[in-house]
Amino acid sequence: MTAPLLQVDDLTITIGALDVVRDVSLALDDGKTLGLVGESGCGKSITMLAIMGLLAEHVRVSGSIKLRGEELVGRTQGALTRLRGKRMAMIFQDPMTSLNPVMTVGEQVGEAIAIHQPDLKREARHARALDLLRLVAIPFPDRRLLQYPHELSGGMRQRVMIAIAMANDPELLIADEPTTALDVTVQAQIIELLQRLQVERRMGLLLISHDLGVVGDIADEVAIMYAGRICERGTVDAVFDRPHHPYTHGLLASLPQIDRTLEKLVAIPGALPSLAARPPACRFHPRCFAAQDICRHEEPQLRPVPSGAVTACHFAETAVASTGAKVRA
Amino acid sequence: MADSAILLQAQPRRWPPWLKLPVLVGIGIILFWLVVCFTIDLWPIDDPIDMVARRLQPPSAEHWFGTDALGRDVLSRTLHGARFSLMMSCAVIVFAVLIGSGIGAIAGYVGGIVDGAFMRLVDITLSFPPILLAMAVTASLGPGLQNAAVAMIIVWWPVYARLMRGQVLSVKSREHVEAATAAGAGHTRTLVKHILPLSWSPILINATMDFGQVVLLTASLSFIGLGASPPTPEWGSMISEGAIHFYQWWICAGPGIAILSVVLGFNFLGDGLRDLLDPRSK
């Protein structure tokens, strides 16, 4: 039995006296997709930057991040640089700013290849870059190689970013809200492309998103984050069909559904607490409909619930059930 | 297919909007002085050092700009002076830009204590009035064109260091730099390929504008006797020699017009370059 592709245990990230992310544990296997869902500012992106080793030096990371059993926390930047782009690659949120505006597409894709295969000849590199653009279904790839990023549309640029990420056949692909900056129709194409690549290459895909619909469509497992902690984690079916955490329930209930008439959209009351003002104990209790005294004094730990997921709520079994609601994204 | 073929065709050429009249004048002036610089030995004019005529002659058909106190042709000396002034300014700017932007780029990219140390050095250097610092350095090294050049490099590099550091800092935080790091690019590659190509345009603009200033400072140093020594036909020292002959205005007029035109030319060109390279700062 080989080690799982990605295993994150008790990851805690602190900046100064603030813990941005606490005790986050995730696992991802080859050929699987893990969705990481949460509101803006809940710590999704910083978790992913920690996995890539891209955090600034004053940010303290503790816990363990293992890529195929190899510990990444505490590694030197030099060692991480050799891994980045080769075994783990990343796609950023905004394709408009993630490409170097003064290099042609071909130069940038070529560079991603050259960094990890410096011996490759110029022609071979060019051929490989052309293949990569075909892989991500860019029309007229030979012409695109000579163009600059400003000559491409947002969707095309995101395809180029994906081509760069795929340059060295990574085992792990991290996509940080890859569709947030794109039109809805283009979003669907990019998600489809990511899913196709993931299946073809048997990559592990860590998809960070706040789009529950997308995660529900392509992820195998999902982890819901709130204020720096994971509040519910499990298979998509378990978490989305039978949510046990009031926050998950609130998220799903707030989705408008095309086949149901709504008087008004259901929103979770309150707002995500700021980093410096996170409530003690259960971080969700000020916004929770089921909060009791214990929620204000004792922090709930992740524990198994009947759906097969794990949930960090004192009242996991009763809170959501009591609303009588049935939800599915 | 047909649509994209049309889109990919080159647009018909139009007159570039940044190429306005002052810019053209600037380019014209600079080109003139460059031609003078490289071909002056072939021109049918008097030797700049020979005493060819009677002293203190006003401008005439024979000596267009008159003659100076030693009977040398002012026009010839002015044109020959271009070589000293322009070559020297060129060397000063090139070295100041290389040293300054190199240090600034490293300071901005590395940050922390390296940044702090270099930038304090920059602050200290910039806290002196430029001409005073240049005078002090030249005086301590001994007068002469070469030492004046060294002094001016010392005066000028911090400007570029500060400019480059700011540029690198702002480009460094852009997403494509993080994306490059995520693709496995190391420090050198990130700095050289993903940061510097987006950082140099204000440096180029500033260098062009500063060229005129360096010409002025060179002349100033020579004027007070710290730069070129006689009989070198250098504009500053020519003005200095002419300054004592108050009624023989033409001695100073030649080199004065030369300095004025060079400074103007480079300022015009710098303005044009700014419009071309940095369309946002209007």
Image: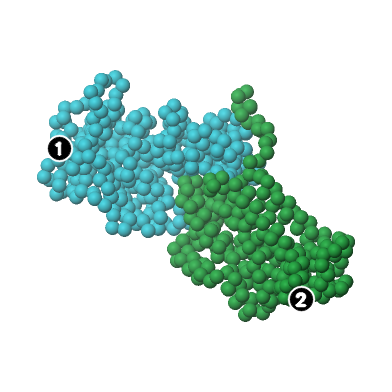
- Residue B8, quarter of the rendered image: top right
- Residue B38, quarter of the rendered image: bottom right
Circle 1 is placed at which residue position? A290
- Closest to the observer, A259 or B249: B249
Task: Point out the residue furthest to the front here.
Answer: B247
- Closest to the observer, B226 or A279: B226
Which SS class for mark 1? loop
Q: Is residue A12 visible?
A: no
Lateral position of residue B54 relative to residue A89, left or right: right
- The chain painted cyan is A
At x 74%, y 74%, the residue is B245
At x 49%, y 34%, the residue is A154
Between circles 1 and 2, the one closer to the viewer is: 2
Which SS class for mark 2? loop
**Residue A86 at what x, y percent from top left?**
50, 46
- Closest to the observer, B55 or A255: B55
At x 63%, y 53%, the residue is B270
The verdict on a common chain for dots 1 and 2 is: no
Lateral position of residue A287 relative to residue B38, left or right: left
The quadrant in which the N terminus of chain B is found is top right
- The chain painted green is B
At x 68%, y 73%, the residue is B223
In the displayed structure, A74 sits above or below B229; it is: above
Q: Amino acid at mark 2?
A: Pro
Question: Distance from label 1 to label 2 (Cα)?
Answer: 94 Å
**Residue B244 at what x, y percent from top left?**
72, 75
Circle 2 is placed at which residue position? B230
**Residue B39 at what x, y percent from top left?**
82, 59
Q: Amino acid at mark 1?
A: Ala
